[in-house]
Image: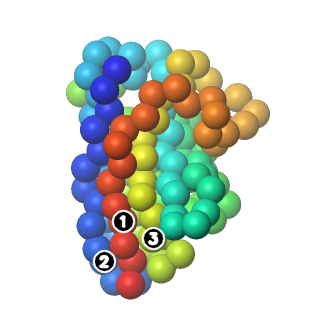
Amino acid sequence: VQLVESGGGSVQAGGSLRLSCGASGSIYGDACVGWLRQAPGKEREGVAAIDSDGIASYADSVKGRFTVSRDNANNTVNLMMNSLKPGDTAMYYCAVRLARSLGPRPHRTSDFGYWGQGTQVTVS
């Protein structure tokens, strides 16, 4: 499985960005997809995840600002980020967990087995 993120960039506080994650293969339909980020000097953290039925979960830090969606027909998962803050600055990764449902800990990084290379988001 290969995952490729796109859509990162630099934006001023209050602005928006849309990240996309495309996958080779057809696993998206039966898998959970997460967006995780890592800022310099900090641990990687999950911010959003979506299961095979389209049920989404968000970290408290992004609730109400980020929206994750999926297009199984095109093997794509998107992350719409609004009202961005400097604290959102990080490398953003999409990742896949081979499970249909999110479960009780949807953002646990160790549960994701496939990762993209990341896309940088900088908010100033």
Front label number (1 vs 2):
1
Q: Quadrant of the C terminus?
A: bottom left
Query: To which residue does mark 2 refer?
Result: 11
Task: Name, please, the residue furthest toward the right.
Answer: 104
Point 67% across, 39% down: residue: 108
Point 48% across, 78% down: residue: 85
In terms of sequence position, does the residue under pointer 3 or pointer 1 come before the other?
Answer: 3
Is the C-beta separation of discs 3 and 2 under 8 Å? Answer: no
State the SS at label 2.
strand
- Mark 1 surroundings: few (<14), some (14-19) or many (≥20) residues within 10 A: many
Distance between the alpha carbons at the discs numbered 3 and 1 = 5 Å
Three-letter amino acid code of the residue under disc 1: Val
Is the C-beta separation of discs 3 and 1 under 8 Å? Answer: yes
Q: Which mark is residue 89?
A: 3
Q: Quadrant of residue 55?
A: top right
Is the C-beta separation of discs 1 and 2 under 8 Å? Answer: yes
Distance between the alpha carbons at the discs numbered 1 and 2 = 8 Å
Distance between the alpha carbons at the discs numbered 3 and 2 = 10 Å
